[in-house]
């Protein structure tokens, strides 16, 4: 039998072109990796409300012919998404309750979160915002003054978090204008960006982005999102090195996902690869009860066993904190404190 040959398309040089090239049908994704719907027990689906989106760089990291590839399982819309899932929600973190202004979420006293973009280059099938109404809740240019006024009016806010979607889906010019406006608020000291784009499109680290980071007075923290060591390609490591050289503090958050990274050996390998790239593990999230993603769940007892094994494999600074976000709580809830 002839081996399956990968034939991922070449990556365009322009990161925005790569972002546009990410949108695929489920059939096209399977074609790229040499698989068919019959390779999956529940088949596959196309969800027009949350379509498949996989940038060429990430697509090239998927092993062809492997229906259990941990990168593929994160982005392929499988038939399990349509199975009955009691207790699953479209707003699992009850974020609508925390809107302080259009585009602004206030969950924690010292931080404000801006939904800076509704776009994300890669659609992770477990995403807790996969049903989010970005049209109603996203920061817009017309609503920006009101959003910034909320932050400026509360001296307790020391850190502004840019989230989405993905804030790095914004153009360099748009991002620079927003960061400049935030930096003009004297009591804000830290800017944090949460981004999956850096793993999916490492070319997003442009000279203009680096210039923006070097120029701002704010301490810049970027929390990347990587779940498996194979996501950290040489190109991703180079991009992260450029950010570190510009003065960025780099952290990683992962999600504990069934059949993707739910064992200590896999997670330890991720932590070591992150550290080699200058990134410290931060959070390992238990999945949120979002509709369509129950097949990714790992129960708390299994998570506790993984945590205990990880502590025997790694130094403490490489062990991510396993947490769950519980609506109404004033901070992430660590695994040991869950009811």
Image (tube, grey):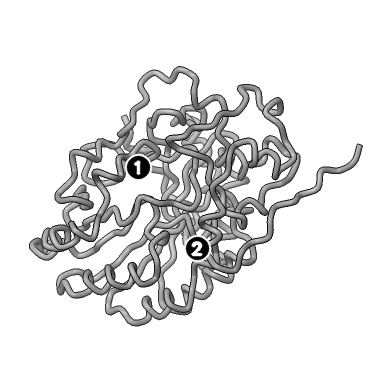
Residue at x-position 37% and y-position 25%: 88
In the image: residue 117, left or right of residue 47: left
Q: Which residue is mark 1?
A: 334
Residue 134: which quarter of the image? Answer: top left
How many C-alpha atoms fall within 10 Å of the one at disc 2: few (<14), some, or many (≥20)? some
Residue 49: which quarter of the image? Answer: top left
- Closer to the camera: disc 2 or disc 1? 2
Q: Is residue 138 above or below residue 233?
A: above
- Give whichever of 98, 21 is nearer the camera: 21
Residue at x-position 49% and y-position 19%: 83
The Cα–Cα distance between marks 2 and 1, rounded to whole angstroms, is 37 Å
Pointer 2 with pointer 1, Cβ within 8 A: no
- Give whichever of 332, 113 is nearer the camera: 113
How many C-alpha atoms fall within 10 Å of the one at disc 1: few (<14), some, or many (≥20)? some
Dot label at residue 211:
none
In the image: residue 3, left or right of residue 95: right
Residue 235: which quarter of the image? Answer: bottom right
Query: SS for tag 1?
Result: strand
Q: Which residue is mark 2?
A: 16
> Residue 317 location, x and y as percent?
46, 59
Q: Pick whichever of labels 2 and 1 is earlier in the sequence.
A: 2
Q: Is residue 43 above or below residue 68?
A: above
> Residue 167 location, x and y as percent?
37, 59
> Residue 137 location, x and y as percent?
24, 46
Q: Residue furthest left?
A: 153
Query: SS for tag 2?
Result: helix
Residue at x-position 19% and y-position 58%: 142
């Amino acid at each position: 039998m002839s081996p399956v040959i990968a034939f991922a398309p070449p990556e365009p040089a322009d990161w925005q072109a790569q972002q546009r090239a990410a949108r695929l049908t489920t059939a096209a994704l399977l074609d790229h990796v040499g698989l068919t719907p019959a390779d999956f027990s529940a088949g596959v689906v196309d969800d027009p409300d949350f379509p498949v989106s996989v940038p060429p760089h990430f697509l090239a990291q998927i092993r062809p012919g492997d229906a259990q590839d941990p990168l593929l399982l994160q982005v392929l819309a499988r038939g399990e998404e349509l199975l009955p899932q009691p207790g699953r929600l479209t707003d699992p973190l009850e974020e609508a309750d925390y809107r302080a202004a259009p585009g602004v979420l206030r969950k924690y006293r010292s931080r404000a979160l801006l939904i800076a973009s509704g776009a994300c280059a890669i659609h992770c099938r477990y995403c807790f915002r996969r049903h989010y109404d970005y049209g109603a809740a996203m920061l817009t240019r017309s609503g920006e003054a009101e959003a910034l006024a909320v932050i400026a009016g509360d001296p307790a806010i020391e850190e502004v978090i840019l989230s989405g979607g993905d804030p790095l889906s914004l153009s360099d010019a748009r991002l620079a204008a927003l960061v400049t406006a935030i930096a003009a608020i004297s009591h804000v000291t830290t800017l944090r960006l949460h981004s999956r784009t850096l793993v999916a499109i490492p070319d997003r680290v442009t000279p203009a982005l680096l210039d923006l980071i070097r120029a701002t007075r704010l301490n810049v923290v970027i929390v990347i999102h990587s779940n498996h060591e194979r996501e950290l390609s040489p190109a991703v490591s180079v991009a992260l090195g450029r950010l570190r050289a510009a003065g960025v503090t780099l952290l990683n958050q992962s999600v504990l996902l069934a059949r993707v990274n739910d064992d200590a050996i896999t997670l330890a390998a991720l932590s070591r690869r992150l550290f080699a790239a200058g990134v410290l593990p931060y959070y390992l999230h238990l999945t949120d009860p979002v509709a369509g993603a129950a097949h990714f769940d790992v129960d708390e007892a299994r998570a506790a066993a993984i945590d205990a094994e990880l502590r025997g494999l790694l130094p403490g600074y490489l062990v991510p904190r396993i947490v769950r976000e519980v609506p109404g709580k004033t901070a992430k809830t660590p695994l040991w404190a869950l009811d």
